[in-house]
Image (cartoon, coloured by chain):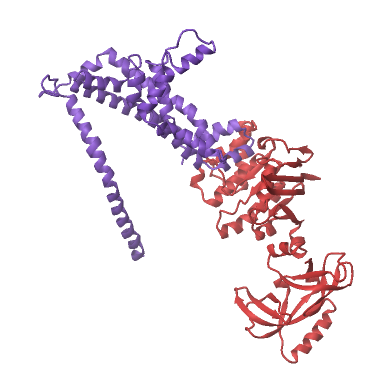
Chain colours: A purple, B red
């Protein structure tokens, strides 16, 4: 009996050993390029401003108090979150049907659709954003088309505001919600939908009662990914946002590069990160309730 | 009265002709198995009945109601899947309640029916469990309960026992059959397991390559197979080739074979001179050691048994001990090999000469 038990124990120990080693490279990368820089930013945000160096000697909380007392910064923070939330909802609404279709379809055109889904990721960020500028500018493709069919006489303001940023970000981040959802939906046995239909439920009822609840893990993963990526995006809001669509990351870079206010910029970055963590934490808690019945 | 009529349905996928003119009439309360190897069209037939596939032509009637063009949810069916297909995010009670909610059954009525059906599948007290907390057999019983609680007009079962281990599978066969008879529900059961089909069904539809090879009771199919492929698919069988020498009665023939003349039973209307195969099941052949002297007794014995008895001589070439029986391979004078089951306690050795005796009524002629 004891001999029988000893064998698997030895095996599992050696397995655990090798697993630990496999984590090391990623861990080194994360500590070296994520945890340490973050610590530096935190310390930087607590330093006094200086005109002679990146930051002064003394410690202070003033950067935080100033930022948190500034309605302008609150406004930008709110806009950033609003853009993030809008992009997340839009990409979910647009992405879910695509993922659903891809998961169900056995057509040979499916691989073509896959390429379309991934296409935003295949084009460089700056190039793609320039393309959106060509489309969305006052004299751009979208406005000219709308004018040509007589819907408008004056150009619509499609960029240099939150709208342009939202449109472009939704386009970029669509794959990030489709892929986790696709994996999730493919793992749901088609028998479940058939069982539901056989019990008398319509397609609609089957979707709401069976498929949707079971795809919550994919929805959760995808929406968090898109939300976090959207609120931290820089290039798209920098190029398409103008002043009307300025977000926190654009503001932080402006502090650091244009104004050379490193400690204040660091404080803004930390505030942004803290708010993001808070929102994601809250979201995880809310969605966990919806998923508590899942295996 | 037929509860379910499948009338000449066809189904094609591109060039593949999956179902060819399938017609099956099913009486009320009958348990009918669709039996065949994978790819024979049995699952497609079931899906056509369920409404998940639409036949290209032909029609499907539930009673007098033509359901060919209706959606699955409009058909009033209960379905049990190989994968159980229980909703993993719902408790047992919620799974059972699902179909009742769709039918707008009142809450107290719902609770009563759920309690009743749980008792029926012997899962009282499991209502608050999640499917993942149950064993495979229990999950399949919940699936069965979920299909039955809505009191459908037809119960469809798609290889429901294929995922269970052998012992449980045996137990569940009788459980399902017993439940089906108590409820009296018309049932269609898809399986590739002939033993399952034999013990459970009132009628078996043997299918191959999109056509029906035979439709009949388990006894008819086992004892009177319509073709060599049916005989081969259901149980073990021996065949000896021959030619009809004369018809002795409506269904009895004398057949000339390389081992001599054999009295047989066969379908009516076989013409003299027709090439046939004589099928004999291994358990219907009796053996006796053949030694000098005893051989004479044999002849006398067969004489006593009348014209019905056939005796063939052969030599044991292989013997496999199987516990309850010993399976012998016997080589006949003609060179044909036959398989014979003998009592496991008095085996015959390889090389021994044996007399094989079998009744004409235990044979069946197959057109070759």
| Quarter of the rendering occupied by the C terminus of chain B | bottom right
Q: Is residue B91 above or below residue A157?
A: below
Dividing the picture into quarters, in which one does residue B153 lie? top right
| Quarter of the rendering occupied by the N terminus of chain B | top right
Question: Seen from this angle, which residue lies furthest top?
Answer: A153
Q: At x 87% / y 67%, what residue is drawn? A: B271
- Residue A93, given in percent of the width and then of the height, sits at 49, 27
- Residue B351, given in percent of the width and then of the height, sits at 64, 85
- Residue B166, given in percent of the width and then of the height, sits at 57, 60
Q: Of residues A124 and B324, which is closer to you in this image?
A: A124
Question: Seen from this angle, which residue lies furthest bottom?
Answer: B292
Task: Evaluate whether residue A289 shows in this view.
Answer: no
Q: Is residue A28 left or right of residue B82?
A: left
Q: At x 34% / y 62%, what residue is drawn? A: A7
Dividing the picture into quarters, in which one does residue A242 lie? top left
Q: Of residues B294 and B135, which is closer to you in this image?
A: B294
Q: Is residue A274 above or below residue A99?
A: above
Q: Is residue B90 left or right of residue A258?
A: right
């Amino acid at each position: 009996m004891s001999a029988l038990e000893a064998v698997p124990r030895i095996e599992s120990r050696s397995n655990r050993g090798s697993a630990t080693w496999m984590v090391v490279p990623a861990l080194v990368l994360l500590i070296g390029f994520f945890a340490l820089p973050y610590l530096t930013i935190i310390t930087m945000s607590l330093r006094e401003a200086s005109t002679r160096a990146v930051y002064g000697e003394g410690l202070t909380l003033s950067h935080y108090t100033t930022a948190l007392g500034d309605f302008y910064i609150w406004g930008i923070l709110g806009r950033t979150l609003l853009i993030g939330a809008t992009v997340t909802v839009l990409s979910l609404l647009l992405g879910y049907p695509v993922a659903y279709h891809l998961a169900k379809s056995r057509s040979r055109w499916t691989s073509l659709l896959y390429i379309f889904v991934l296409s935003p990721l295949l084009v460089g960020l700056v190039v793609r954003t320039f393309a959106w500028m060509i489309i969305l500018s006052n004299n751009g493709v979208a406005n000219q088309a709308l004018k040509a069919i007589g819907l408008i006489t004056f150009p619509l303001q499609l960029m240099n505001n939150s709208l342009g940023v939202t449109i472009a970000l939704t386009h970029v981040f669509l794959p990030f919600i489709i892929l986790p959802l696709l994996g999730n939906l493919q793992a749901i046995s088609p028998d479940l939908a058939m069982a539901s239909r056989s019990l008398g439920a319509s397609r609609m009822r089957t979707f709401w009662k069976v498929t949707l609840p079971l795809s919550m893990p994919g929805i959760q993963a995808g929406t968090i990914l898109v939300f976090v990526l959207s609120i931290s995006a820089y290039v798209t809001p920098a190029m398409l946002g103008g002043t009307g669509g300025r977000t926190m990351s654009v503001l932080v870079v402006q502090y650091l590069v244009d104004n050379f206010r490193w400690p204040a910029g660091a404080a803004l970055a930390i505030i942004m990160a803290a708010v993001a963590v808070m929102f994601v934490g809250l979201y995880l808690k809310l969605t966990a309730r919806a998923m508590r019945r899942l295996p | 009265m037929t509860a379910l009529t499948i009338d000449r349905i066809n189904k094609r996928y591109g060039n593949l002709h999956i179902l060819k003119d399938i017609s099956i009439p099913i009486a009320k309360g009958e348990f009918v198995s669709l039996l065949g190897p994978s790819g024979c069209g049995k699952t497609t037939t079931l899906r056509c009945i369920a409404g998940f596939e639409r036949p290209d032509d032909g029609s499907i009637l539930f009673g007098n109601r033509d359901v060919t063009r209706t959606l699955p949810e409009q058909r009033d069916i209960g379905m049990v899947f190989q994968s159980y297909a229980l909703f993993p995010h719902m408790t047992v009670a919620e799974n059972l309640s699902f179909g009742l909610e769709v039918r707008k059954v009142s809450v107290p009525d719902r609770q009563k029916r759920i309690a009743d059906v749980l008792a029926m599948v012997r899962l009282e007290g499991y209502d608050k469990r999640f499917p993942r907390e149950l064993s495979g057999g229990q999950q399949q019983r919940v699936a069965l309960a979920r299909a039955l609680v809505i009191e459908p007009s037809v119960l469809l079962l798609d290889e429901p026992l294929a995922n269970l281990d052998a012992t449980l599978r045996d137990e569940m066969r009788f459980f399902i059959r017993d439940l089906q008879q108590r409820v009296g529900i018309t049932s269609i059961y898809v399986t590739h397991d002939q033993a399952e089909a034999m013990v459970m069904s009132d009628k078996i539809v043997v299918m191959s390559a999109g056509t029906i090879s035979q439709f009949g009771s388990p006894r008819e199919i086992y004892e009177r197979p319509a073709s060599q492929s049916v005989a081969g698919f259901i149980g073990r069988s021996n065949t000896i080739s021959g030619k009809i020498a004369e018809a002795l009665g409506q269904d009895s023939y004398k057949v000339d074979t390389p081992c001599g003349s054999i009295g047989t039973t066969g379908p009516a209307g076989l013409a003299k001179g027709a090439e046939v195969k004589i099928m004999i099941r291994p358990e219907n052949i009796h053996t006796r050691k053949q030694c000098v002297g005893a051989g004479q007794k044999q002849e006398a014995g067969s004489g006593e048994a009348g014209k019905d008895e056939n005796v063939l001589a052969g030599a044991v070439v292989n013997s496999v001990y199987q516990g309850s029986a010993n399976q012998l391979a016997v080589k006949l004078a003609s060179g044909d090999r036959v398989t014979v089951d003998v009592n496991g306690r008095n085996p015959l050795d390889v090389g021994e000469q044996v007399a094989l005796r079998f009744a004409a009524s235990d044979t069946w002629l197959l057109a070759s």
